Amino acid sequence: MSDANGFTIEWQRAGRNGLATITVRLGGDVAALETFNLGKPKERTKFAKGLAGKFPALDAAGIASTRSGLVVREAGRRRREPLWPFSQVLHATVAVAPYDADARERLTGLWTALEAYRRGDGYAERPRLRTRYYDDDAWIALAALADGSPASAARAIQASSS
């Protein structure tokens, strides 16, 4: 699994019984390398939490729950992050979701939270603002394509055509 930022998760079988070596690369550099049993939920969760420790954007502290749903913001701050950092949190969550149940749950909330940024056919820099950066729309489209769900694919087409 790879994205346009060079965030790549590779795996290779390492024996029998579900054992695999997972390599996470960021910009070509190895960010994490671990061998564990992919068939064991506790081991997958341990790996995902370790990865979240190395990449704080994956940590739940950067994704806050509010009355209106999830928001992405810097830990300890009230203001929502602009769309570009939001898109990077979205990318990271999409990349980890196949391996982590918590990330899968957060992913649904993040797609819902993205709607606060919507302006017409695309997305604004921040909720309730009009400034749009079309490359941010492209990042959202790439995350949607990486997610692979039909709803996400529809988002990708809409964002990339605006």
Image: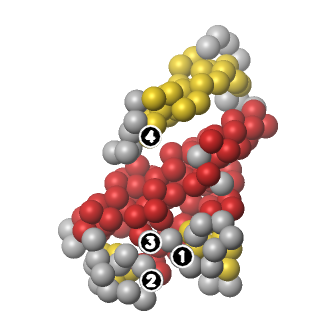
Q: Vertical placement of 35 versus 136: above or below?
A: above
SS label for mark 1: loop
Between disc 3 and disc 4, whose residue precedes?
Answer: 4
Amino acid type, residue under disc 2 in the picture:
Pro
Image location of residue 114, percent across then percent down = 47, 73
Figure label count: 4
Is any atom of residue 69 visible in this view? no
Between disc 4 and disc 2, whose residue precedes?
Answer: 4
| Residue at screen point 42% across, 69% down | 83
SS label for mark 2: loop
The residue singled out by tag 4 in the image is 7
SS label for mark 4: strand
Q: Which image quarter is the N terminus in?
A: top left
Q: Nearer the viewer, residue 144 or 50?
A: 50
- Farthest residue in the right direction? 42
Image location of residue 9, percent across then percent down = 49, 34
Q: Vertical placement of 41 versus 108: above or below?
A: above
Q: Are marks 2 and 1 in contact (CB under 8 Å)?
A: yes
The residue singled out by tag 1 in the image is 80
| Residue at screen point 54% across, 32% down | 31
Please tell me how crowded label 2 is: few (under 14), some (14-19), or many (20+) other residues with Cα within 10 Å.
some
Tell whether 48 sits left or right of 131: right
Please tell me how crowded label 4 is: few (under 14), some (14-19), or many (20+) other residues with Cα within 10 Å.
some
Please tell me how crowded label 3 is: few (under 14), some (14-19), or many (20+) other residues with Cα within 10 Å.
some
Amino acid type, residue under disc 3 in the picture:
Pro
Image location of residue 100, percent across then percent down = 66, 46
How much space separates mark 4 and mark 2, taking CA atoms?
27 Å
How much space separates mark 4 and mark 1, taking CA atoms?
24 Å
The residue singled out by tag 3 in the image is 82
The residue singled out by tag 2 in the image is 127
Image location of residue 81, percent across then percent down = 50, 71
